[in-house]
Amino acid sequence: MNGATGGNSVNLLANSKEEAISIAKQLIGNSRVSGDQSPTERGLNRGLTGTITGYLTKIEATDYEATYSRTLGGQIVDKPVHDTWREWFKVETEEGTGGDQLQREIEVFNRNLTTWQAFQLADRFACLDGYSLLYFGVNDNLDPKEELGTFNEVKFLKVYRRGSVIEVKRDDNKKSSTYWDPTIFKIKVGETDRGVHASRLLIFSEDHLGDPLENSIPKLQRPYNYLQLLENLAWATGEAAFQRVVPPWHVKYDERPDNDVAEDIENQFDKFRTGGLQRISSSGVTIEPLTGSEKMVPVKDIEEILIDLIAGATNLPKRMIVGSSAGALASSETDLKDYYAGIGARQENYAEPILREFYTLLQDNNILPDGEFDLIWNPLFALTEKEQAEIWNEKAMAATQLAGIGVQILGTETIVTDILGLSPEQVAPPTAPPEAQANTDQTGQELWTQFYMNTDETQKKYENILRTFFENQMRAVLKAFRSSEFNTYQANAPATEETIKAGQKELEGIMNKLQIEAAELGIAKVATELGLGKGALDIETLAALETKAIKLAGEITDFTIEQVRAATMEGVARAEGIPKIAKRIENVFDQADKVRATRIARTEVISSSNHARLNEYKKENIEKKEWLTAQDANVRETHRIHGQVVGIDETFSNGLLHPGDFSGGSAEVINCRCAIRAVIIDKPAPVSRLRPRASSGRT
């Protein structure tokens, strides 16, 4: 029942005929009429003054508690608190400085005093009330009102809510460096009041306007009005649905009727109750049904708007607000990324300083050993095994399609690192079937060994050169990164990318020298194999190698930029500072030093050497070539063709003209160790560089 009064007239709505009659009788008898109220009506009738468009201008602690316990407010407060503390940090210390002991002592202390629960509870109360206090009881044998003295034990941790604080005394000495800082908190403990010195407390207050006590902002303050509107919408929707099934009745009362009229009204009530009358209209009292348009307001649309407004006011993804899990597909990847970036920033900029202040205090009192330490927060979000399996299935299908379409769009390195998300160490080499391992050719094996050992020295030489190059590039990039005005909201750091590009010319020179030396090795090997004089690279080959070196150096540079950019973006997404992002960049170059240098050197030496061998065979009118492998478990599937013979201009069954043939794509080239040899059917008449040689006896 709802009503409004104006002058001597009263207008009321009833949900049934019986209720309408009862109301009319109460009005005639001058009885007090009351009815159900919407949430907003309840709020407006509390006696508070000053409202703006129906919103309360002063929200009490009880209002926040009611919103927290009865609406979505609980999710808004609890979700960021839970995610901030649920993945407890790890402690990292410097090696060789007693760091291991410090790390163990912190972990033992946290476990014994259930630090995690105390800090999480203090954070929850701070979000709900605006601020909270964490009191640590110690054995300094002083009154709690006195400044903290020396102690050697923390006996307990106790959390106090804002509502427990009766009074805050401040330093009123205007000449003091701590002017207006809190000094004594008067806290209600049970039925008594206790004074506690500020040095014995940790203050939790994330959001405030200058003063964490007087100007703190509860987590529900910004979305409060929207939450109330959402509650009103739910109430009104239920009321409207009910009224569509049972139409309401309008009861209008103007004045008390005289006795004759009152008797007539009673007669009408009887007929009205039994259906003899559809409405009552008499002097002073009118009862009639109300019918609407039968159209419902777009409740779902209004609800979506309110949820959007709440999400914007709280920085929570919509699906988290309404209770779905963080991994729900309904939440977009961008929303989740932004949310967890915010939680990462909250851990580093809000939670960590409080923890560090606490542990440093313990170090000062010899409860914890001295030493520098870092708090490394564990990953915030992990997929379930089922979700991981689904993603891996999709990635594997994509990788299979990209690697097997015949035209090389993406190289193996891109597929492995970017699509599958694996490091090269995680990729196990294929295991050759028993028959392939058993099928050995001693002569071919010896020739492969000679060929590979012939290139091994050059490979190691350029591994070291490339490692030095990457190390120097890392130092230059880190220097540029740390000295630049780096904006953590702009992942593409121009200073680092320009520094990487600046090293491309040097890399071109390294790759060109590598390819020339490898090609000369191939030519020298052919001379030994065929009994020829010493050969040399022609102008066309030198030009081709230079072009290849420029192209390869550009690809390596671009890949390095992509890796550094990805590492930087990951750090930005976690709201990390420059030191931690710099560490991520360092890891990129560490990977380049340990893995990429070896891979590049091996791949390019084998490719250039085999390419030069094939060209020499053609010059000497060799008609056929044979594929040689190491015949071990590391030979990839498509290269297990040891002993296969094809024409000199034909491709082998794997589509390659020779091992290291880049026309087959990087999947066929990277880390290849295979070789080719000439198949001499009839001893040819060499056209150049002939010298006497013994018959090889090979066919």
Image: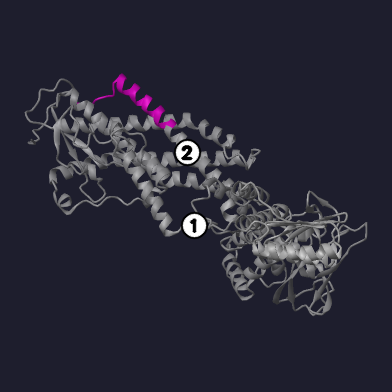
Secondary structure mostly seen in magenta is: helix
Percent across and percent down for residue 132 are: 75, 65
Percent across and percent down for residue 523 are: 24, 29
Any part of residue 33 in sight: no
Q: Amino acid at mark 2?
A: Thr
User: Which residue corresponds to mark 2?
Assistant: 560
User: Which residue corresponds to mark 1?
Assistant: 382
The local secondary structure at tag 1 comes to: loop
Q: Which mark is residue 170?
A: none
Q: Is residue 117 above or below residue 487?
A: below
Extent of the magenta region: 533-554
Percent across and percent down for residue 453 are: 26, 42
In the image: residue 30, left or right of residue 350: right
Viewer-nearest residue: 58 or 138: 58
Of the two numbered discs 1 and 2 in the rendering, the one whose residue sits closer to the viewer: 1
Viewer-nearest residue: 401 or 681: 401
Q: Are marks 1 and 2 in contact (CB under 8 Å)?
A: no
Quadrant position of the N terminus in the picture: bottom right
